[in-house]
Image (cartoon, grey):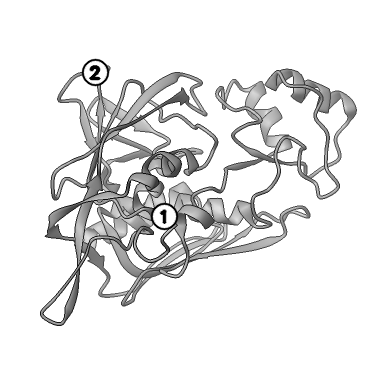
Amino acid sequence: MNRTIRDGQSGVNKGMGKVMQLQQTVKKSYSFEGKGLHTGRIAKMTINPAPVDTGIVFRRTDIGEEATVAALAENVSNTARSTTISSGEVSVSTIEHVLSALTGMGVDNACIEIDNVEVPILDGSAKPYIDAIWKDGFEQQDAPRRYIEIKETIEVRNEEKGSLVRIEPADEFLYDIKIDFNSRVLGVQHAQWDPSVVYAEEIGVCRTFVFFHEIEFLFNNNLVKGGDVDNAIVIVEHPVTDAQIQNMSRLFNVPALGVREDGYLSNLVLRFPNECARHKLLDLIGDLRLCGGFLKAKVTAEKAGHGINTTAAKAVRKTL
């Protein structure tokens, strides 16, 4: 893979002694199909090329040709366990992974068609989008990229949760995140994204995670209907019985699972020791795309989640 050109850096036009980044879109349409993590509903989603200055727009094909909602912070309608945007009767949920993928790969404009309410969870990361789109490169467009530049520091805090998102003026993007769930298994983890980090190889491939005790609660309350052992890292924070493990295997309809010595369920092998922090960074990148473009700023986040991420994006939008 080309570290310089494809990781959100393509579309560069040099002239008059300056470097100008051009907008770009995908070269063709790419379709994905799978179940939604929370609804369990099967959806088919297609990422299509879009004209200059479109940004990212979702179209609900099951509702109608004009059933669209733009990926902008003012359209956020729910942040419970994922990010949902709405416009009138049109809603699309769990949009953060596809927004992150398009941002990390440097896609300015795309129209995303979907025939149900929730984006498919696929493998729990942005990897399926990267695997499909990355190899083809991108279509440069005849207009400069519209960067979002911050003039003054924006800081959002949630004192109850101890969470923070700070966005500061900078000459180029830098995202830095720390996660701390007071977990003996996870510990305190850090992850970072800047122009030296290849999003497609080091961030986009990182999967979502959940604690074992949360899964039991969610299943018992008829939530995460689309969850399975192929799309989530499962952290076993507290001692569990053989009966609990057997029940989990039965819920997921898989052969007997176990608990590894490092405290993770045996369903997956970690791609990075700090994969969980990297996934939270993936989410942060996707949520902050709701600012309406590419942030040229230093972003610092602690104990962040969809609620505070999108609140920060709204705060940025108000300054524009």
Quadrant location of the N terminus? bottom left
At 69% from the left and 57% from the top, the residue drawn is: 273
**Residue 215 picture quarter:** top right
Q: Eyeballing the image, is 177 above or below 79?
A: below
* Residue 240: quarter of image: top right
Residue picked out by circle 1: 285
Q: Nearer the viewer, residue 235 or 219?
A: 235
> Is label 2 in contact with label 1 (beta carbons under 8 Å)?
no
For the residue marked with disc 2, what is the amino acid? Ile
Neighbour tally class for label 1: few under 14, some 14-19, many 20 plus, Cα within 10 Å: many
> Could you tell whether 84 is left or right of 260 in the image?
left
In 3D space, how far apart are the residues under numbered discs 2 and 1 (Cα atoms)? 29 Å
Is 61 positioned to the left or the right of 52 in the image?
right
Residue for point 28% across, 55% down = 291
In the rendered image, which residue does mark 2 sit on? 63
Farthest bottom residue in view: 17
Residue at horizontal 67%, vertical 54%? 181
